[in-house]
Amino acid sequence: MTRLLTLAVGLLVTACASATVPEPTTTTSATTTTSTITRPAETTTTAPPASPTLPFVGSAIYEPPAPGSEPSPVSLTIDGISVSNAPVRDVGVLESGEMEIPGAAEVGWYRFGPSPGQPGSAVLAAHIAFDGRDGVFRRLAGASIGARVEVMYSDGSTRAFEVVELAQYSKEELPTSEIFSKSGDPRLLLITCGGDFNPSLRSYTDNIVAYAIPIPD
């Protein structure tokens, strides 16, 4: 977490660029997938294509949810990595086909997927660093298994999740069909960049994905 992901160097610069000195390469114990991803061309912003290209999260197959069917996430807290009430805003797909990613201080919720806690995989993406500043997910790779994640919604309610897996994927091998699934048990996926930093491209080689599941009420 923004493989959240990717295809073109220009996309990577948009999502993962940083004017700060990057932290050392992140390594996790999670298994890396080896799937190959084909990303079709995109065309629109207001009515996103069936398979948008995401800056650092690959491509997804989806159907837009019914407007207002579920409350949307508005803030995020993750224990242990200095994320406290980080603002979350819904994002879509730009005319270029890229997923819109907020600035360093915000988290983007992919609004064409489920809201956190609904069936399928809800995707929240944020920068590791952007425009010379640490991003909200700067320390996501250091999240602990079992860490508590709290999401506040637009209707004032909150829901708790627990991190159950932390994975690191090369950008070419991100399992997008799994990450952007709209069916199955509810999961919350937190995504940013990771791995080695390429100064010439001003981007990272990998993506970090934290998988979380709802904590029963």
Image (cartoon, rainbow, N blue to C red):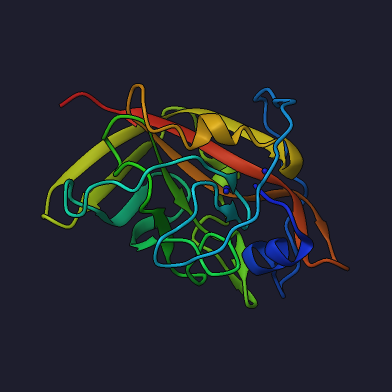
Camera-side residue of 95 and 77: 95
**Residue visible at 38% across and 33% down in the picture:** 182
Q: Check the image and name the residue furthest to the right.
A: 200
Q: Is residue 108 above or below residue 6?
A: below
Res 171 quadrant in image: top right
Q: Is residue 55 above or below residue 158?
A: below
Looking at the rendered image, the quarter that the C terminus falls into is top left
**Residue visible at 88% across and 68% down in the picture:** 200
Residue 104, position as x, y percentages in the image: 52, 70
Res 95 quadrant in image: bottom right
Camera-side residue of 50 and 73: 50
**Residue visible at 62% across and 58% down in the picture:** 55
Left or right: where 84 falls relative to 177: left
Q: Is residue 124 above or below residue 91?
A: above
Count of marks, rendered view: 0
Left or right: where 16 falls relative to 107: right
Left or right: where 141 falls relative to 6: left
Residue 53, position as x, y percentages in the image: 60, 53
Camera-side residue of 40 and 120: 40
Residue 203, position as x, y percentages in the image: 76, 61
Residue 147, position as x, y percentages in the image: 41, 34
